[in-house]
Amino acid sequence: MHTLARRRPNGAAWAIVSVAVAIVATLVAVPVGAVFVYAFSRGFDPVLRTLARADVHSAMGLSALAAAVSVPFVTVFGVAAAWVVTRTELPSRRALAAILNVPFAIPPVVAGLLLVLVVGPHTPLGYWLAARGFPVLFAAPGIILATSLVSLSVVAKDLIPLMEALGPAEELAARSLGATPFQAFVRVTLPGLSLPLLHATVGALARALGEFGSVSVVSGRIRGETMTVPLLIEALYGEYDQTGAFVLAALLALVAIASLAVKKAVEAAVARTVNAEEVSP
């Protein structure tokens, strides 16, 4: 079996790579590095004072709560939606595939306004919930709902093309041996999607932690109660507390970097396991 010899990059290839690296450095690395420089430009004392503030603790807790609830929901929904779209013949699967494009098509602020129209205090559903001690808007449930809505399609849109490319052959073989369609998907297809699913989940986490537009509409921006970290960053910057704003921005950047590091570590562990299985007799 013939293999193509790896060619050494020529001048044009080096030029393309250099331009790509320069663009990435200009648009990503330099701004992220500037955030950390500004955050620590006045030493560690302002950083510690910012992190000790009660409104910062409230914002961090609310952002963590919104991510902890929305990301598992979005992940489970995305896997189920991808299975329905690619592995069933239900008439509604085409409608579901079209609905999955809605969160990407509408601006986040519009998504927040849609929630106001559905569960606002002046709507029948919102009034009914508020009368029973479960207000949605200007409270944590509304923030969780807005976060889930804007990131609803992140996992599904990543998995659907991959599942279509894999095809149902292996699942059909498992079903011929007595497995149900759900068992065949969970035991045969889903393990092979572990890395893409991890990638999609990290993307959903980043979207949840960084969501601003829809949350700003439904939260009411109550300091110390309904402000997430992105909302508090905007408020601090508007109050000319640039150190506090950049400290929180650096905190979000650290969370994103840590998420990527975990993803890379898991990918490396899976690759080592696969290589070991291939080498073993």
Image (cartoon, grey):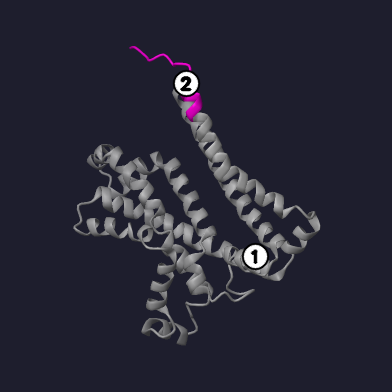
Query: In the rendered image of this protein, does residue 62 appear above or below residue 12?
Result: below
Residue 53, position as x, y percentages in the image: 72, 68
Q: Amino acid at mark 2?
A: Val
Q: Which residues are magenta?
A: 1-16
Which of the marked residues, 1 or 2, is nearer the chain's N terminus? 1
Graded by Cα atoms within 10 Å as few (under 14), some (14 to 19) or many (20 or more), the crowding at tag 2 reads few
| Local SS, label 2 | helix
Residue 201, position as x, y percentages in the image: 47, 50
Split into 4 quadrants, where in the image is the N terminus? top left
* Label annotation for residue 279: 2
Report which residue position mark 1 lands on: 237
From the viewer's perspective, is 82 left or right of 10? left
Residue 258, position as x, y percentages in the image: 60, 47
Tell me how many marks there are: 2
The answer to whether residue 202 is visible is: yes
Eye-nearest disc, 1 or 2: 1
Residue 252, position as x, y percentages in the image: 61, 55
Split into 4 quadrants, where in the image is the C terminus? top left
Q: Is residue 250 magenta?
A: no
Q: Nearer the viewer, residue 8 or 186?
A: 8
The answer to whether residue 280 is visible is: no
| Distance Cα–Cα, label 1 vs label 2 | 55 Å
Principal secondary structure, stretch drawn in magenta: loop
Q: Nearer the viewer, residue 60 or 131?
A: 60
